[in-house]
Image (tube, grey):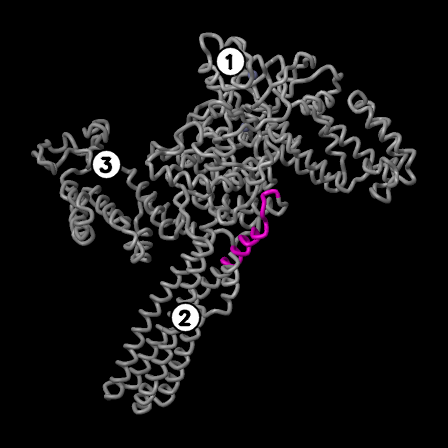
Amino acid sequence: MGDYEASKINHDNHLLLDQPLLRLPYELLRKNFRSAHFVIEKDSTQVKATLKEAATASLSGKSSPDDVLKNLDVMLNKMRGLKRKLSACADEEERLYRQLDARTAHLAELNDIHTVDDVRYQPWSRKRLDRLMVDYMLRHGYSDSAEAMSEQKGMQDLVDIETFKSMNRIRKALENGSVAEALAWCQENKKELRKMDSDLEFNLRYQQFIELIRTQDTPRKLEAIAHAKKYLLPYRDTHPDEVSTICGLLAYPPIYNFDSGTGRPNPSKAGIFPLQLGPNYDNNGSLYPLLTVCPPRYTNIYSQTRWQELADSFVAAHNELLSLPSSPLLHIALNAGLSALKTPACHSNVQHSTAAGYNTGNKNTTVCPICSMELNELAKAVPYAHHSKSHVEHDLYVLPNDRVYGKARLLEYAKKNGLPDSLVKDLVTGDVFPWDELKKVFIT
Amino acid sequence: MDTLRREIHSLNKAPKLRSTVQDVDKIIEELEAARAQVAATLDTHTASLTMAKLQNPLNRHFEVMTQDLKNVSKVHKNLGKTLDKAMPVKPLPTDHDVMAEHMDLINRAIAMHLLREGEFSVAETFQNETQDDVTLADVTATQPSTGPDGTEDQIMSEPDGGGPDLMEMSYQSEPVAKRQQSQASHIPPPELKDRFADMYRILESIRHHDLGPAIEWAREHSEELEARGSNFEFDLTKLQYVWLFRGPEVNGLPSDRPNGRLGAYLYGKENFPRFQARHLHEIQQLASAMVFAPNLPDSPYSSLFAVDQSFSEIAASFTREFCSLLGLSAESPLYIATTAGALALPRAIKYASAALAKGTAWTTTDELAFETPLPSNMIYHSIFVCPVSKEQTNEANPPVMIPCGHVLGRETLKKLCKGNRFKCPYCPQDGLFKDARRIVL
Ligand SMILES: [Zn+2]
Ligand SMILES: [Zn+2]
């Protein structure tokens, strides 16, 4: 039963949860390089052009020394601006190099640890748990906790507070109905998003359109049409469904709060009477008396839950762009770990003892982590572990109450309880029985 | 990893974006010099001459800058390659994130972990932040999918060996409203913080070789400890006796109360009698050791009196007993679960990708479809796999012992039955179905 194989650390596979630890700074390094490249290209092209123009003008006598000075000042300003931006990029690069250094050092500590029983493994694995918790906190927007934790543990270089803070800023803006922040982010990452075939920008623009229509204010509706022409029509080929709803949306104003189930107006929430009357057609060509029944596709469009969907799809794009897994790492670790530890006994109505490791010298029988209050309810969500062989104590005996224990443990417990040699005590229920009522159990 | 480590270590010598900043500086210098020249004379000829002369050096600097940028790009590309080699991308299983539906329970587990680790201020920050979150979600309620509130009091009850304290810990025995009830599941029992504060206070004393607070705690919980079959109280008394016995030069205790052999004698006389029924032999040994006092290290009792390890051992067993009386495992369950997760993950990924290829989900059944071996110290309950069906027994198919003492899964036994009778597959005995006993392993 001393499963040595299971205690071995397979270095190729032990760092699966730690991939983002190096991937993220690397992706940020590339992103940072791209912005450096971009500003250099932009500003140096302009400065070079200004220089050429100014020199030509000056040489041909078209400009005065004052004009030359003015041009030089323009160039100096540009270059000083460039210096500021590049210095920020250079700082960021240094920060990321420092992070990468700290992170590989942390991962390399595992190199000469070959089994989980190594005393050095526990501190390492605890540090990993700390990282996973901070990752969890950051992804859910608990940034005060994340900061407090990383400061307390001195692990600032091992966690990504800034990245997630700015992600959460944009996410919260979307949840509060503001697209500006997300659109700016799309602008910053235009190329990469295009490579990913991301819908995000289209959906943001589409939402802007919906919000303009929602007001039912004539100038806003005109603005909506202009907006649709500029930002939505170009997506006709990739998003034919949404683009085809544009005209429909102009016809189905959200005056009634349509019931999304039946498509009928919800009378309790009825607003102003519709201005337009008359039959209308939906895309399938069937007749809908205007504003009596709204096709479900339109009621969904006015739904407030779209903001949450936008926030979620922003987060998804953000994580994909930075090679981050879509779920918090702690979820992934818990999902696998709870299952691996869970046994049928953990949620059983019958009280089971904890002692399987008893023979291997693991005499410190403690409450099982899945049975413990912290995780018991959570573990209901996962299946229990699969075992192909039994794990039981040696030399088992069944008590008259049908409970089974190893002989060594029964002897020790009886002695601890000061019982005479002829008696045993049930470790869970506390019942006392004479030894000769016990029966040997054979496990094959 | 080593190659990657070396490469990252040498990055400080590699070309960096800082070099382009220096290039910009040079361009700024040239521009400033030119400006100074033009400004000094304000003469048309000088101006055009300066501008003409500025072209070449400036363009050269721009070229250098482009080259510098290229060099940096090369460094990044190489780093990417080394990273891919050292840590090839292996997608994590995120398709069925069942944990996502149980944020409240995860938050609670984290809060409890922080408390048991003694991170009280982080725990408080976390609890405030998560509580705001819950309140917010409840108020806005735009999303019907937010938080299932079917969480019952059951969370508070402990299925395995929970002490009586647990009932005291659930602070709302009669929840006023469902809302409050669901909120209660987000936070650890309020008393937990005080309990762990106690625990750390006592541990701190033990670390300073002061057993007083631990002894006091053990005496208060004497009955519960005894019910657990724990020797903790006696172990403490024994260590205190030994500690006094070693005298002021070892224990450094003030001499205002009896110390040394006399102190130990008086302490033992007062405290050992309570344990006589259960530990008579050991008490006798400790008493006899008095005789060897001058040259204890050479006596047969030397091991009884070694204290170097004893304090850290007593600290560990104190933590274990303390947590057990709270119905909690001694080691943080969150720590064990994530460590087990890291160990089980490679198998899970392997299986999940195979299942994905077959189009089957892997989290819908009661039992995992693949084995995730864990070290034996991570196996807490007995596992019984029926030797005939190779199925793990559970509530629906419990282990049964037949009269010969062999154990089978109940389903197997049913199949073996011809009428009411069966033949044991492992020995020549046969029996009646009604004589099979359901056993609890
Ligand atoms: Zn359990
Ligand atoms: Zn048999």
Give neighbour class at mark 3: few <14, some 14-19, many 20+ (Cα, 10 Å).
some
Who's the residue at 81% across and 35% down the image? B304
Who's the residue at 53% across and 30% down the image? A370
Who's the residue at 52% across and 40% down the image? B338
In the image, A251 versus B294, the foreground residue is B294
x and y, in percent, of residue B370 in the image: 45, 34
**Tag 3, which chain?**
A
x and y, in percent, of residue A169 in the image: 39, 49
Q: Which residue is mark 2?
A: B71
Q: Which residue is mark 1?
A: B423
Asked whether the viewer can see residue B138, the reply is no
Give neighbour class at mark 1: few <14, some 14-19, many 20+ (Cα, 10 Å).
some
Q: Which quadrant of the structure image shows residue B322?
A: top right
Q: Which quadrant of the structure image shows residue B325?
A: top right
Q: Which residue is mark 3?
A: A300
Q: Which residues are magenta?
A: A99-117
Residue type, numbered disc 1? Lys
Q: CA distance from mark 2 to mark 3?
A: 52 Å
